[in-house]
Amino acid sequence: MSENDPKPIIRINGLSKHFGAVAAVDDVSLDIMAGEFFALLGPSGCGKSTLLRMLAGLESPSAGAILIDGEDMSRVPANRRPVNMVFQSYAVFPHMSVLDNVGYGLKVTGVPAAEVRARATEALELVKLDDLGARMPDQLSGGQRQRVALARALVKRPKVLLLDEPLSALDAKLREAMRLELVNLQETVGITFIIVTHDQEEALAMADRIAVMDQGVVRQVAPPAELYEFPASRFVADFIGSVNIFEGRVSEARDGVITIDAPALPRPLVVEQDKQVATGAKAWVAVRPEKIDIVKAGAGPLTETQEEAVNTVPGVVEEITYLGDLSIYHVRIAEGAEGLVKIAEPNFDRATNRPFTWEDAVMLSWTADAGVVLDS
């Protein structure tokens, strides 16, 4: 590692937490870099919040170690760790003004009143609430109260800010706006942010890297685009975004091309991927809905992309989900769950002008580099 490379601000080594016979966190090892926006993502009960609480010192590990800025945290209590935490519930004090809420943590540790006021004002400026310091919490919107909680966490100048589902109580439009504000805030203050969320869209939109957790185990750690385009397992492929997964067996693998016989498809799947797989091994192919082209059967000449496609399959439109900017076509290609394929198409034309509709015979196609072979 060169001097210019980012260095870990947090090192997690073999961390576990057991509640009786249940392993909430199971032998997790992670490095989180200084100045990184890092997300812990997974379904409810996967261990992500327990892991965050151990970083904060609110839970004690059953095994393993946490180092923050090179210091072992095993004997460091929560109030002495260089971290601060923003909870899902804002927990602002209703009887204090916004400015007093933000400065409270400094005041109780004996910081002089003039410095408390100056630092609280500075923190409010960071979250764009400097003109609302005199207001009471019940005079604020949900988004403004969330900003107060952020300012209160930042005022103590932690090395790491921990965020536990901080946007879940907000409505959809405000949640989207706050995502951008959190990213901009993290870039402004330059400290490490670690967010826990079950919302994969939220993690993809904000994080530099994401750790996907399942049953207490980290299944993959990667930047958002890598997680989406090259998932390491069926769980990650299915949890991150929407996906079609075809099961089959490897019939051939050479020169960076893998051929898989999938019972749900009329002909073998062809995937361009530099991956070591054994002939005869069980495998799955993940194909994202937006990477599949759909045309009405017998509709005329193919586009250039469709001509390049080596994977083609006929089907019948069974359902259409209209999402405004997109339409999701559910196409039946065979019996059973695997026989229903999802295709995402942008709505360049109005929905009334779509070229095919329910019960239409269609042809699906995708290129060899559109799919990813998974072996677990």
Image: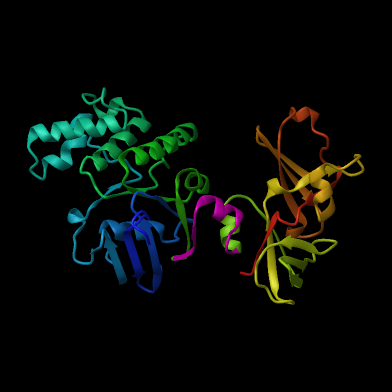
Is residue 143 on the magenta stretch?
A: no
Residue for point 45% across, 53% down: 209
Q: Nearer the viewer, residue 304 or 235?
A: 304
Q: Residue 20 placed where, x, y %?
A: 35, 72
Q: What segment is highlighted magenta in the picture?
A: 217-233
Could you tell me how many numbered marks the image carries?
A: 0
Q: Nearer the viewer, residue 295 or 357?
A: 295
Colouring of the image: rainbow
Q: Nearer the viewer, residue 12 or 100?
A: 12
Residue for point 74% across, 59% down: 338
Quarter of the rendering containing residue 170 = top left
Q: Residue 56 placed where, x, y %?
A: 27, 56
Q: Residue 312 placed where, x, y %?
A: 83, 54
Relative to 123, say whether 367 is above or below.
below
The quarter in which the N terminus is drawn is bottom left
- Residue 217 at least partly seen: yes
Is residue 232 on the magenta stretch?
A: yes
